[in-house]
Amino acid sequence: MKKIKRNKQKIYYDKKKDVLWFLVKSGAEVEYKELSPGISVELGKNGELLGIEILNASKVLKPVLSSTEIVSSVSS
């Protein structure tokens, strides 16, 4: 059985701009792709996922979480 190496993922939320960003892996961003309006991924040299950005996060995630839950989960 192959062991899965876990990365230390980080989550950032800018309340003023309402942007949620997930750091998946450190590295130099080479490509930026928009998956759908307001949801983008940052890719590295070999196409590896470096980060995920969600604009208007409170509106995009409203069906799933309240903005209070987003802020409290990021703050902890």
Image (cartoon, rainbow, N blue to C red):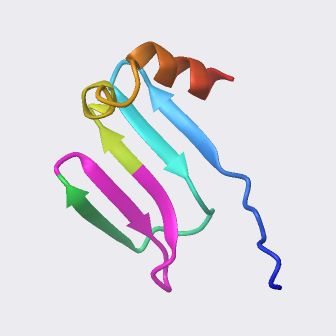
The image quadrant of residue 3 is bottom right
The magenta stretch spans residue 59: no
| Residue situated furthest top in the rendering | 68
Q: Position of residue 44 (x, y in %)?
A: 49, 75
Residue at the image position 57 percent from the left and 18 percent from the top: 72
Task: Say how many tags the image has.
Answer: 0
In the rendered image, the vertical position of residue 10 relative to residue 45, given as above or below: above
State the quadrant of the N terminus.
Answer: bottom right
Q: Above or below — where is 15 with respect to 38?
A: above
Find the magenta span and give its range: 37-52
Residue 43 placed where, x, y %?
Answer: 43, 71
| Residue 7 x %, y % | 72, 60
Q: Is residue 50 magenta?
A: yes
The quadrant of the picture occupied by the C terminus is top right
Residue in the image at 32% along x and 66% along y: 32
Furthest residue toward front: 1
Q: Residue at horizontal 16%, vertical 49%? A: 37
Q: Taking 1 as reference, is 14 above or below it?
A: above
Q: Tell me residue 61's x, y (percent).
A: 33, 32
Q: Is residue 64 above or below residue 43?
A: above
Side of 60 where 7 appears, left or right: right
- Say whether residue 13 is left or right of residue 74: left
Looking at the image, residue 56 sits to the left or right of residue 30; the answer is left
Task: Residue at 51%, 76% (x, y): give it.
Answer: 48
